[in-house]
Image: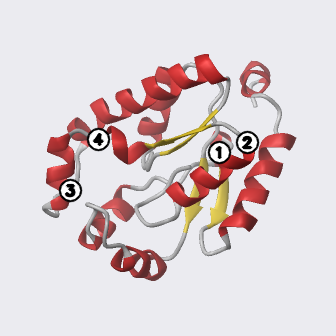
Amino acid sequence: MMGVSGCGKSTLGALLARRLDCAFLEGDAFHDEKAVTKMRSGQPLNDDDRWPWLDRLGLAIKETLASDGQVVAACSALRLRYRERLRAVIGGSVRFILLDASRDELLHRLRQRTDHYMPASLLDSQLATLERPADEEKVLRLDAVALPDELCDRVHAWLEDAPSLTTDRASGH
């Protein structure tokens, strides 16, 4: 699951992992204390902050795939180069699902959260950083305003209908 803070990555990721009977990895858990402190104080992360986080998360995904065969993870993956980094570290089949919502909806959700270090004041920096995936990335894009169960059904159907990534890459698609 990918997208800016407040889009529902964690909710949908956990729901999908239960449906698939596999592990769920919360990307936020892989930030180091320095990055969390930075975000908590209202400062956006930069690439130097994100690379080690992406590597830690990517390795955890890779290890979970090796042991369990399947895993769902939540990660903002805002830029193409972040998604490419994750794919390189993981080395296996990776699918991204973008949860998209309007700025107003995201801001409303962030203001409702009281138990997260990511302040609503960082939303605009995340939206500015977000590089929406191009068609060739084969990312499923969903309207995050839909009910989580509906979103889970759509993702599950997409995963079941999609050819394997190794087939996609081998054929150049």
Whole-percent x, y for residue 42 in the image:
16, 64
**Secondary structure of residue under mark 1:** helix
Residue 17 circle label: 1
Q: Which numbered disc flags the more N-terminal residue, 3 or 4? A: 4
Q: CA distance from mark 2 to mark 4?
A: 26 Å
Left or right of 49, for residue 87: right
Q: Are marks 2 and 4 in contact (CB under 8 Å)?
A: no
**Color style of the picture:** secondary structure
- Circles 3 and 4, Cβ within 8 Å, touching? The answer is yes
User: Residue 20 has which mark?
Assistant: 2
Distance between the Cα atoms at labels 1 and 2? 5 Å
Please tell me whether residue 89 is drawn above or below residue 72 in the rendered image: above
Residue position marked by numbered label 3 in the rendering: 39
Q: Earlier in the sequence, mark 1 or mark 3?
A: 1
Which mark is nearer the camera, 2 or 4? 2
Left or right of residue 162: residue 165: left
Residue type at numbered disc 1: Ala
Crowding at mark 4 (Cα within 10 Å: few <14, some 14-19, many 20+) = some
Residue 147: % across, % down: 67, 72
Contact between marks 1 and 2 (CB within 8 A): the answer is yes
Q: CA distance from mark 1 to mark 3?
A: 27 Å
Residue type, label 3: Met
